[in-house]
């Protein structure tokens, strides 16, 4: 019999593995590293080919990670409650082009972050509901994570949510989604960039007395509880594309902290029919430069119109490098390209006139990176663009480019009418400590 899967820090040497429950509850490992599984469990991919609903695929794909964990009997309930969201893979253009888009924007806050945030909330609800003191979910956001986490944790008695977002660097509708909650959600507008927000959150977690006092936990993609459910939509989508178009589906994924992309890498390692994985970056080139030069040079982020990907020091790279220690090994898993704002804007306009599709700036980044692939590469496989947010979240950018209004999904419409609750804060740990009181 094989040992159940355990989770270790990307930094720790030697023993000290934890269960999935503990890895999710802690978020960041005590040594500041990120949790990774000791091995990837075997999945009977063939048995899942008949599954149609995302919760069913998720249950099959994730069962091995929960084996022998206290949450094992609850996984079915967790995925039913968290992942009962549409995630269709639809054709773009003519069928013979074998180009698709994986639409991850049908959740309550219209971005893919809903999948991970809801899974995390349902998981923690089962671990925490009888805890004596509430957990504080501290989340640094470049725009979409905070809203998704707030929506998933709003009015849960066992939790409090504290959102850190960069002032002036998120879209107006994103800001509304970050601040429309109140109750157990505290929204802090930080005088700094997303990197400052991320640094502040990390400093708070590593401040042991502060972390213990508030029972701090993370909902960023450093938390493995966000990455696991994201594998489910790649699993379902790749099996669907294989049925429809033949061959392994290749994905172009808008990338910031690489949480979404890394879930695709794991889904492929589990045996789902996924071919190439290409990372689409905006002008923040840290990862493409690394793949080209082999030098890992994190840097300050640059503000772009695909702002949820404005990350200069992508946190999940630590997982990639732990799992694939040599440059050649990383290159075998991933390739990457970077495009600037002008190209993103041009792509939004061009694909609207050619296909009638409305891309958000992040999705358009992927569409542009796809267009830049060699034509023979594009013809050789079915390709899937990953649509990470609804264009209506970025209406101020998209509408002038396509010359019409973007219809607002009803769930988003409701949030746009709610009143705002927000506090301004300087980017210091002392200020954050004060706000947490
Ligand atoms: C968060 C986000 C991304 C980047 O995802 P990562 O997992 O950080 O790479 C891309 N697009 C949108 C719309 C996002 O909200």
Image (tube, rainbow, N blue to C red):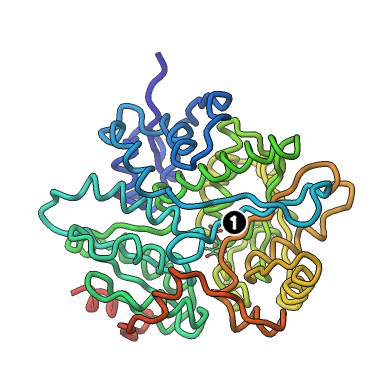
Residue 285 image point, x, y percent: 67, 65
Is residue 88 or residue 5 the one in the foreground?
A: 88
Q: Nearer the viewer, residue 9 or 248?
A: 248
- Say whether residue 174 is left or right of residue 184: right
- Rendered position, 430 above or below 261: below
- Quadrant of the image occupied by residue 118: bottom left
Q: Which one is nearer the viewer's eye here, 128 or 291? A: 128
Ligand 1 quarter of the rendering: bottom right
Residue drawn at (69%, 61%) of the image: 366
Report whether residue 328 is seen.
no
Image coords of residue 128 (percent x, y):
20, 49
Residue 232 visible, this orientation: yes
Residue 74 location, x and y as percent?
29, 36
**Relative to 216, is 291 on the left or the right?**
right
Q: In this view, does 340 lie above or below 119?
A: below
* Quadrant hosting residue 127: top left
Residue 424 point in image, percent of width and height: 34, 86
Q: As drawn, is 117 to the left or to the right of 436? A: right
Which quarter of the image is occupied by the C terminus? bottom left
Q: Is 241 rendered above or below residue 104?
A: above
Is residue 50 positioned above or below 302 on the image? above
Q: Which residue is found at the position 38% from the left and 43% from the top?
A: 79
| Count of labels in the image | 1
- Most distant residue in the top direction: 1
Pick the quarter of the image with the N terminus.
top left
Q: In this view, does 243 lie to the left or right of 12?
A: right
User: Which residue bears the numbered disc 1?
Assistant: 103
């Amino acid at each position: 019999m094989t040992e159940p899967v355990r989770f270790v820090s990307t930094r720790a040497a030697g023993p000290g593995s934890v269960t999935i429950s503990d890895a999710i509850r802690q978020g960041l490992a005590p040594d500041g590293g990120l949790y990774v599984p000791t091995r990837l469990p075997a999945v009977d991919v063939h048995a899942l080919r008949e599954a149609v609903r995302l919760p069913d695929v998720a249950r099959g794909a994730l069962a091995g990670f929960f084996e022998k964990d206290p949450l094992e009997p609850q996984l079915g309930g967790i995925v039913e409650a968290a992942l009962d969201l549409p995630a269709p893979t639809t054709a773009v253009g003519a069928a013979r082009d074998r180009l698709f888009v994986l639409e991850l924007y049908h959740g309550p806050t219209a971005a893919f972050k809903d999948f991970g945030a809801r899974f995390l909330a349902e998981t923690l609800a089962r671990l925490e509901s009888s805890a004596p003191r509430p957990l504080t979910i501290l989340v640094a956001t470049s725009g979409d994570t905070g809203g998704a986490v707030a929506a998933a944790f709003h009015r849960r008695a066992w939790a409090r949510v504290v959102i850190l977002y960069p002032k002036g660097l998120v879209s107006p509708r994103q800001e509304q989604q970050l601040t429309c909650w109140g109750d157990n959600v505290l929204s802090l507008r930080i005088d700094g960039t997303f990197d400052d927000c991320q640094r502040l959150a990390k400093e708070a977690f590593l401040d042991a007395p502060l972390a213990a006092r508030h029972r701090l936990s993370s909902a960023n993609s450093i938390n493995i509880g966000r990455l696991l459910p994201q594998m489910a939509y790649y699993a379902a989508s790749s099996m669907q594309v294989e049925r429809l178009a033949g061959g392994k589906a290749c994905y172009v994924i808008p990338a910031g902290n690489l949480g979404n992309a890394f879930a695709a890498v794991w889904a492929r390692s589990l045996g789902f029919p996924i071919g190439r994985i290409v990372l689409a970056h905006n002008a923040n080139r840290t990862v493409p430069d690394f793949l080209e030069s082999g030098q890992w040079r994190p840097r300050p982020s640059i503000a772009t119109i695909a702002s949820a990907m404005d990350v200069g020091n992508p946190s999940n790279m630590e997982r990639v490098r732990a799992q694939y220690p040599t440059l050649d090994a990383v290159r075998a898993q991933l390739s990457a390209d970077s495009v600037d704002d002008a190209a993103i804007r041009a792509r939004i306009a061009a694909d609207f006139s050619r296909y009638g599709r409305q891309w958000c700036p992040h999705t358009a980044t992927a569409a542009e990176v796809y267009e830049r692939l060699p034509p023979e590469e594009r013809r050789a496989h079915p390709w899937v663009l990953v649509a990470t947010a609804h264009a209506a979240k970025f209406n101020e950018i998209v509408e002038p480019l396509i010359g019409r209004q973007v219809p607002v999904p009803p769930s988003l419409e409701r949030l746009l009418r709610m009143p705002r609750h927000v506090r301004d804060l300087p980017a210091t740990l002392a200020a954050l400590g004060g706000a947490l009181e």
